[in-house]
Amino acid sequence: MRISVLYTGGTIGMVETPQGLAPGADLQGWLTDLLAGTDLAGQVVVTTMEPLVDSSNVTPLLWQRIVDQIRRDDESDGFVVLHGTDTMAYTSAALSYALTDLDRPVVVTGSQLPLGTPNSDADANVMGALEAASSGRLHSVAVFFYHELLDGARVTKASSYDLRAFTSPNVTLLARQSPTWQWLRTPQSGQGWGESGSGRPAPYRRCDVPVFSMVPGMGTDRLTSMLRPLPQAVLLRAFGVGNVPTEEPGLITVLERTIAAGVPVVVASQCYQADVDPNRYAAGRELAEVGAVGARDMTVEAAYAKICFLISQGLRGGELARWIGVNIAGELTS
Ligand code: ASP
């Protein structure tokens, strides 16, 4: 058994500096001590992805570097990605789309408190992630955090301070470690990439996709200026099941013109738990009628990473909009 740990940065390996928390801990030494005397001792190799980053600085280019590092490594039976929590849900979704054909586990984790600090969750999270990756029961991308294993394309960061930082609002847990493992169901899966479902995706590229929330009283002029210059796609966080202020003069027309210009508008929700269906209310139906497409029960993170994935595959306009409803990696309920 060989598990490869890819260390990208995040609080887990940070130390106090005069500028605030920044990477600097001896992660390799800590991991060696943590594994001493366990079944995993001597079976884990660490690759540090330089430069280590606070995950606020992650871009789709780092998603791709992680994908490349995993694909290059034929020798490892599984992977653990150590990542900051702030954008972990975006990265785990992005890895899910890009690695549907991998058939080896990729478990993403990190911690709320730096390793070695009082009450740190680093030991438990990393041990749990390594155990999940070496269990033989997982073959896809998942997140392990606070004793819970969650589908990689379904998670959201739910707390900036609670040790239970991640949840998957629209699906149940995959497994719980409390303290022995309880495997609760098989991972969510999708059809994979390409019409055949077995396509090898093109690399992630940076994409220009604004994500914005509708708010009560939002004016058409503000919306118009947010869409200039025209982006590649828009992720709109509407109210509830996908409703917007349809009585605001010109607002729907702006979105209609945007879609007509070849820019897909994907409608997600501001609700923590949601299944978007813009056709349900009159205040959403106009959106659907002008061609906006609902994100169904995808999290905002999964929807954003999916749009970047599809843009990186060269899809635009209506073709991209059609793929939003296709379950590629278990990101939505079929
Ligand atoms: N700012 C940190 C990061 O995302 C937060 C964390 O890791 O918990 O890199």
Image (cartoon, rainbow, N blue to C red):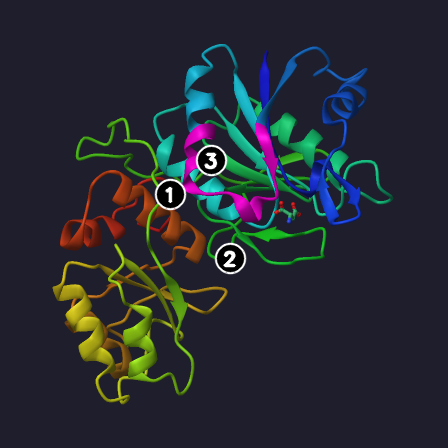
Instruction: List the residue tagged with mark 3.
Output: 62
Q: Is residue 86 above or below residue 204?
A: below
Instruction: List the residue tagged with mark 1.
Output: 330
Quadrant in the rendering for residue 222: bottom left
Residue located at (19% from left, 52% from top): 322
Near-viewer residue (305 or 53): 53
User: Under tag 1, what secondary structure?
Assistant: loop
Residue located at (39% from left, 24% from top): 102
Which label sits on residue 169? 2
Q: CA distance from mark 1 to mark 3?
A: 22 Å
Of mark 2 and mark 1, the one earlier in the sequence is 2
Q: CA distance from mark 3 to mark 2?
A: 26 Å
User: Under tag 3, what secondary structure?
Assistant: helix
Q: Which residues are magenta?
A: 50-66
Q: Is residue 267 above or below residue 174?
A: below
Crowding at dot 3, Cα within 10 Å, few <14 / some 14-19 / many 20+, comes out as some
Residue located at (28% from left, 82% from top): 283
Name which residue type carries label 2.
Pro
Residue located at (53% from left, 21% from top): 78
Residue 166's x, y, as percent? 60, 51
Residue 163's x, y, as percent? 72, 51
Is residue 210 visible in the rendered structure shown here? Answer: yes
Crowding at dot 2, Cα within 10 Å, few <14 / some 14-19 / many 20+, comes out as some
In the rendered structure, does residue 59 fall within the stretch colored magenta? yes
Q: Is residue 255 above or below residue 233?
A: below
User: Under tag 2, what secondary structure?
Assistant: loop
Of mark 1 and mark 3, the one earlier in the sequence is 3
Of mark 3 and mark 2, the one earlier in the sequence is 3
- Side of 98 relative to 155 (left or right): left
Between circles 3 and 2, the one closer to the viewer is 3
